Amino acid sequence: MDYKIEVAKLLAKETHLAADDILSQISVPPNPALGDLAFPCFKVGKNAKLEAENLKKKIKLPKLISYI
């Protein structure tokens, strides 16, 4: 399973962005303590923190993926 692709698909379902566009924006954080993957939520709206919180509420993650 390619987790980056799966995360892009999950985000695409809940945003106005295409999965391919999201996939190109997903990155690996410089510090492993910040997680395995990162997505700039300001791409979804002006308030990145609020958008991240909203996405967290909306997205149902598969058991193999979790939030930190």
Image (cartoon, rainbow, N blue to C red):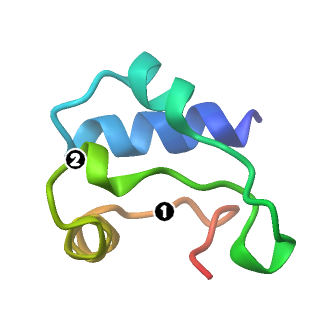
Q: Position of residue 52 (x, y in %)?
A: 32, 68
Quarter in which the N terminus is drawn: top right
Q: In the image shown, does 48 or 18 lie closer to the viewer? A: 48
What residue lies at 82% left-to-right and 70% top-to-bottom?
Answer: 31
Residue at image mark 2: 44
What residue lies at 28% left-to-right and 77% top-to-bottom?
Answer: 53
In the image as oriented, which residue stretches furthest toward the top?
A: 20
Residue at image mark 1: 61
Please state if 8 lies on the left or on the right of 14 as rendered.
right
Please state if 16 lies on the left or on the right of 65 as rendered.
left
- How many numbered marks have been drawn onto this rendered protein structure? 2
Amino acid type at circle 2 is: Val
Q: In the image, which is nearer the foreground, mark 2 or mark 1?
A: 2
Q: Distance between the residues labelled 2 and 1?
A: 19 Å
What residue lies at 80% left-to-right and 61% top-to-bottom?
Answer: 30
Query: In the picture, residue 62 is in which quadrant?
Result: bottom right
What residue lies at 67% left-to-right and 54% top-to-bottom?
Answer: 37
Q: Is residue 42 above or below residue 22?
A: below
Amino acid type at circle 1 is: Leu
Q: Position of residue 20 (x, y in %)?
A: 45, 17
Q: Is residue 17 above or below residue 4?
A: above
Query: In the picture, residue 67 is in which quadrant?
Result: bottom right
Q: In this view, does 44 lie above or below 56?
A: above
Q: Position of residue 39 (x, y in %)?
A: 49, 50
Q: Along the polypeptide, which appears first: circle 2 or circle 1?
A: 2
Q: Do residues under tags 2 and 1 come within 8 Å of each other at their CB atoms?
A: no
Q: Where is residue 46 in the image (x, y as percent from the top left)?
A: 14, 57
Q: In the image shown, does 9 or 42 lie closer to the viewer? A: 42
Please state if 59 lies on the left or on the right of 65 as rendered.
left
Circle 2 SS class: loop
Circle 1 SS class: loop
Query: In the picture, residue 27 is in which quadrant?
Result: top right
